[in-house]
Image (cartoon, rainbow, N blue to C red):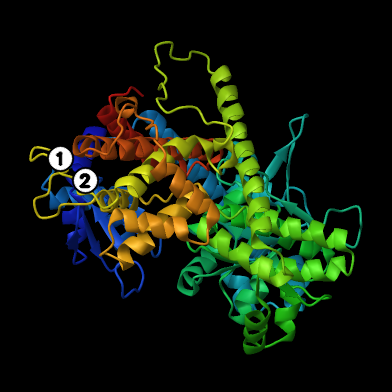
Amino acid sequence: MIPQDTVAKILDAAQIVEVVGDFVTLKRRGANYTACCPFHNEKTPSFYVSPSKGIYKCFGCGKSGTAVGFVMEHENLSYVEALKYLARKYHIEVVEKEQTAEEIAARQRNESLLLVSEFAGGFYRDSLREGEGRAVGHAYFRSRGLEDATIEKYGLGWAPKGRHALLDAARDKGYKDEYLIATGLCKQYEDGHMADLFSDRVMFPIHSVSGRIVAFGGRTLSSDKSVPKYVNSPTTEIYFKDKTLYGLYFARNEVVRQGCCYIVEGYLDVLSMHQLGITNVVAPCGTSFTVDQIRVIRKFTENLVLMFDGDGAGIHAAERGIGLALKEGMNVKVVLIPDGDDPDSYSRKHSLEEVRTFLKENEQDFISFKTDRVLGQAGNDPLKRAELINGIADTIALVPDQVKRAVFLQATAERFGIDERILFDRARKTRSQMLLDDRNAVERERARQERLQDAPEADAVEEQPQEPAPTAEDLAYENPQLVPSERELLWFILKCGTSVLEFETDSEYYDPENRCTVADFIRGYLEADGFRFVNSLFARAYDAYFDIYDSRPELEQEGLVKILMDGPDRPLADLTAQLTQERYNLTVKNYKAAMTATSTMLVQGVPRAIRVYQSLRLKVRLREMEARLKTAAPEEIPGLLREFQEISSLRTKVLESLGRVQ
């Protein structure tokens, strides 16, 4: 274990430009550096490195992080291995300290639980090969079209009829009862006696992403309706079903290679598809598709295809999955297997080429899927048609990327022959309410957790916001809390975008070889941080300004603004007029009295406005991570804490530069 002071020394020494420059040829662009991204193929550079922020960001594939994150990603190293790499680069000695007794005990307990689960996997697998298991369990798998190689590869097994078969075998091998209970393999009753959870069932072992057996699903072959068809392992210290996907260990490499992950509903759906040759397929474990499972998939790809049955239940599951995945920023498609079949039966009836052709020809983006549903359900009923179209707009409102939202809304408006402004307004209101509900839920949970704390820090100092509270007009935007800050940055761009920032020679922003304009300075910092305006009207104005700014360099500021005000986007024109023609009160009180954009005000006000915005965005990130930490699996917590600490440290520096307290 590397001591924290050594970790801090390594992170302080690591210079992002030097580290990335060892692997990528960087070219300077203003205050930043650019290159073609090393993580995906591209011809036009979209990979940025910001030395002042110590981060990299690709605007093509979305990968970003610090120096240590780059080494982890590029060299496929663990966090500790990446730290050791950087330590060698910067000649820092690493002396690892011994783990505490508590840390050793926790690690040993976790390993013991995994060993018991793996013993059970071997026991069930061996039971399938002989006697009752072979006659009943193996015969069942073969009747479902599974080959022996598939049965062996995925560790399929058989739980004998006796209620103590596993218990007795585990005790004979010296495994403790407490671990059999803790893994959910055995149950202990009130009178103290124990019994196996699984008996007289075919068994599907569930693997972690790293390939360790963490749980099981057991299917009965009995025709007795009183017997549950499936029994699944409960949540344990090593297994969280809402964060686990069946088959992911075997599918992950193909998911990355194909850039796509198929979601099916059952164990046999996964096995049959894998056996056919389509191996980028996974399934939820004993539960409906969850947000946490989507986040696991997002580590490997952003493209998701929901492959469900074509019956009512399958359609309902697809509609639910669409909403969850869109809200998490995934690209979602749907393919429904012809009614009467499921992925398992369909794959057994057709060749690999036929299934691939079917998937290619029948995958629909979620807009087409929902549109077909509207046309099928509504018929000629105008009220039902309107209700279902509103439902599509509400679904599109879940998409976090504003450009994608706009494209989807335009496509829907064109498909139904509706004025797109109507759909934009509906989606804006839905999204505003959704974001408000989410924020309120987070705040309620935060308040609840604070009340539960036994000894809250009495001397903790809460940051005093210096930005004005959102007005009633502000609440119409997607994120009211960011409205004042985004409005201020946009005011600087629209009012003074072509003005050159004349920094003093002792300023941290002074660069004699690159005298930035206000517009370039703001754009450079937002791009380096990976930020885009959250509120769509401001984002449209920002994009429209830079489209003209980049394509018409001969224009003065007045000409740029005139084009915006004369354009067809009237809300944008009104906003431009409001910010440039009327006196605007800056949110930073030191500049409230400023009537004109003087050079002194710009060199002080522009950097400060950026830091205020950075602070607010980082605050949002921290609150999101706090919520994630409360539901994270144990193995995810160390990584989340490291990311939380990095973001918190960065925000502290930003607040200190603003003269604020955290």
- Left/right placement of residue 309 relative to residue 262 reads right
Mark 2 / mark 1, whichever is N-terminal: 2
Point out the image quarter for the C terminus: top left
Residue 284, horizontal then vertical, whole percent = 65, 57
Q: Name the residue under label 1.
A: 508
> Where is residue 213 drawn, in percent x and y?
56, 55
Q: In the drawing, does residue 330 fall left or right of residue 466? A: right
In front here: 270 or 1?
270
**Residue at x 67% of width, y 70% of height:** 414
Q: Looking at the image, which residue sits at the far top?
A: 458
- Residue position for label 2: 52
Q: Which residue is drawn at 56% across and 42% down?
A: 477
Residue drawn at the location 81% of the way across and 56% of the way down: 387
Disc 1 residue crowd, few under 14, some 14–19, many 20+, Cα 10 Å: few
What amino acid is at disc 2?
Answer: Ser
Asked which secondary structure carries label 2, the reply is loop
Residue type, numbered disc 1:
Glu
Quarter assignment of residue 463: top left
Instruction: Answer left or right for 606 relative to 383.
Output: left
